[in-house]
Amino acid sequence: MGISTFRWKTKYGQPNWERISWLYMRLSGLVMFLIVTFHLLYMHMVVRVENLTFQNIVDRWNGPYGLAWKTLDTALLIFGLTHGYNGVRWSIDDYVHHRGWNLVLKMLLYIVGSILMIAGALAIFVGPGSLV
Amino acid sequence: MGALVETLRYVISYRGTEGHWAWLLHRLSGLGIALFLSMHIISIFSVGLGPRVYNFLHEVLYVSAPAKVLEVFLIFGVLFHAANGMRIIVIDFFPGLGKYQRTIVRIELLVVILVFIPAAIITLQGVL
Ligand code: HEM
């Protein structure tokens, strides 16, 4: 499928959620390409993972560019989790055709995904060390 | 599950070309990164639990020697998935490029490997 055959609605006039998720994978992929390139270059190559200690995170989130860092981390959380878990959902649909198991696995996926989204947002917005 | 077994049989017997292997690697890398991301969010969540918990998890999950080796695989997966994802997006928006896709996959793989080698060396500095 290419973008030229993209339609928002099915032939019955309902929103075509599968196609919209197809488009979403492309748009989130484009955004993530930029953020992930920066993330790999800066966090993994410049700072290096072993230096990403608690103190390093506190300094970044509470420093002069704190808002920029939190925005970037939130974008990566939202796009990475929704794009990644939508891909897992596609794979479940491809391989698990038994209706019951398909439903069970996808429900589990949505529950775990929601918990992770909340956990990630808490980490970014509640503040280092303030969950205890 | 039958579908999964069927797919596995297909994947090894189907004599697909560049596009087949690119698709397979895209799916495997995507699922792998999604698994890593799930663990990663939990360890970042522990920032809220204070330095002791966070630094302990950080040491075990990211700094230990086995973790550094896994990081190299992760970097390869991310580089490939990002480059291949961009190929898919570009060809979807410019379908005329589709007839060159076998060449594009080869160039893409070359670029990924050229970026991966220095990245792997930097990552493993101090481990090897
Ligand atoms: C770095 C930028 C990224 C780009 C450009 C990108 C691009 C794409 C595209 C275009 C697709 C759709 C493939 C198709 O329709 O066949 C896709 C699928 C997928 N992506 Fe990404 N992606 C990126 C990052 C990520 C990340 C961070 C994760 C994991 C958290 C991820 C996990 C997945 C999964 C699981 C699939 C489904 C694979 C399949 O259906 O075969 N991607 N990606």
Image (tube, helix red, strand yellow):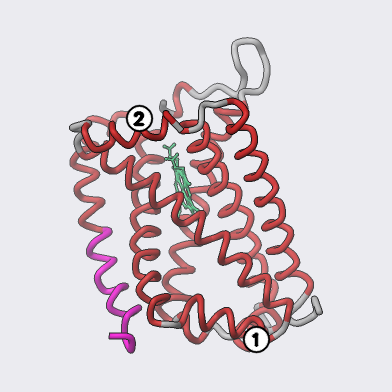
Image height check: is A53 above or below B45? below
Q: Is mark 1 within 8 Å of ligand 1?
A: no
In the figure, residue B3 lies in which quadrant? top left
Could you say whether the residue bearing mark 2 is in a helix, strand or loop?
Answer: helix
Dot 1, how many residues are within 10 Å of its Cα: few (below 14), some (14-19), or many (20+)?
Answer: few
Report how far apart the C-alphas of labels 1 and 2 lie in the structure. 51 Å
Which contiguous range is marked in magenta? Answer: B112-128
Mark sitting on residue B6? 2
Is residue A41 left or right of B115 when viewed as pictured? right
Task: Please name the residue shown 61% across and 72% down the image.
Answer: B43
Image height check: is A42 above or below A117? below
| Residue A26 image point, x, y percent | 49, 41
Residue lying furthest top in this view? A12
Image height check: is B124 above or below A92? below
Is residue A28 left or right of A58 when viewed as pictured? left
Between circles 1 and 2, the one closer to the viewer is 2
Front one among A12 and B64: B64
Magenta-span inclusion, residue B123: yes
| Residue A131 image point, x, y percent | 80, 76
| Residue of label 1 | A59
Magenta-span inclusion, residue A70: no
| Residue A86 image point, x, y percent | 56, 42
Image quadrant in which the C terminus of chain A is located: bottom right
Could you say whether the residue bearing mark 1 is in a helix, strand or loop?
Answer: helix
Pointers 1 and 2 in contact (C-beta within 8 Å): no
Q: Is residue B93 visible?
A: no
Task: Please name the residue shown 58% across and 79% down the image.
Answer: B57
What chain letter is assigned to the residue under label 2? B
Examine the residues drawn in magenta and state their main secondary structure.
helix
Residue under disc 1 on the same chain as residue under disc 2:
no
In the figure, residue A40 lies in which quadrant? bottom left
Q: What's the residue type where badge 1 is placed?
A: Asp
